[in-house]
Amino acid sequence: MFDTELSPTQRARLALEDFYADYVACLDEDRLEDWPDFFTEDASYVLYPRENEDGGYPIALFSCENKRQLQDRITSHRKANIFPAHWNRHVISSLRVTALGGDQVETTSNYAIFQTRQDGESKLFQVGQARDKIVRDNSGLKFQSRHIVYDTSRVQTLFVTPI
């Protein structure tokens, strides 16, 4: 039923698919303390609105320049931020490998995030595109950079959980 003979390209694509599935599960299962472990120590994580990206304005809504800043974001989320209780479901699609070389790969993917609040109503929270650089180290795949361009022009609430 399953072809056990996979080419190196097929194995690489499956590893990427598993990496993204694990990433989304970490976020959607609220295991946010584990989230920074998906990044290298010097990772860049930036969220840009589409209008800034298209206009060439280097102004991000949110930016972290290393893993320690990602960890600080989670500490702030858990201890300082006030926001309504909610649950997110991330959907990642159209994964494309745009550059491949050695232990590094560049990808683009589309994403949608659905959010459910305590009242039980689910809404589309945000959509956009992620442009990622992923490297392989001794512990597996890691984001070296995650450049997110969101299309949703009006941010309905705080970006309290990662994208």
Image: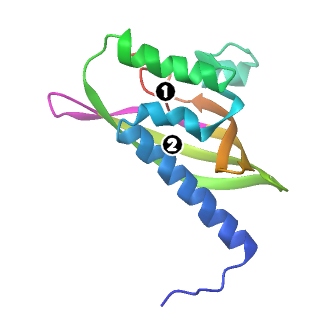
Disc 1 or 2, which lies upstream in sequence? 2
Position of 70 with respect to 114 (left or right) is right
Please tell me in which quadrant of the rendered image residue 79 appears: top left
Type of amino acid under label 2: Tyr
Give the label on residue 111, or none.
2
Q: The residue tagged with tag 1: helix, strand or loop?
A: loop
Type of amino acid under label 1: Thr
| Location of mark 1 (residue) | 152
Asked whether residue 125 is drawn in magenta, I would say yes
Asked whether residue 83 is drawn in magenta, I would say no
What x and y, as percent, mark residue 90? 42, 42
What x and y, as percent, mark residue 73? 51, 18
Give the label on residue 88, or none.
none
Please tell me in which quadrant of the rendered image residue 7 appears: bottom right
Tell me what residue is drawn at x 46 percent, y 22 percent: 74
Please tell me in which quadrant of the rendered image residue 16 appears: bottom right
Position of 109 with respect to 91 (left or right) is right
What x and y, as percent, mark residue 96? 67, 55
Q: Which circle, 1 or 2, is nearer the viewer?
A: 2
**What span is colored magenta in the figure?**
116-129
Instruction: Give the prevailing secondary structure in the magenta stretch.
Output: strand
Name, please, the residue furthest toward the bottom. Answer: 1
Tell me what residue is drawn at x 56 percent, y 59 percent: 17
Position of 148 with respect to 122 (left or right) is right
Between 103 and 56, which is closer to the camera in this rendering?
Answer: 103
Residues at badges 1 and 2 in contact (C-beta under 8 Å)?
no
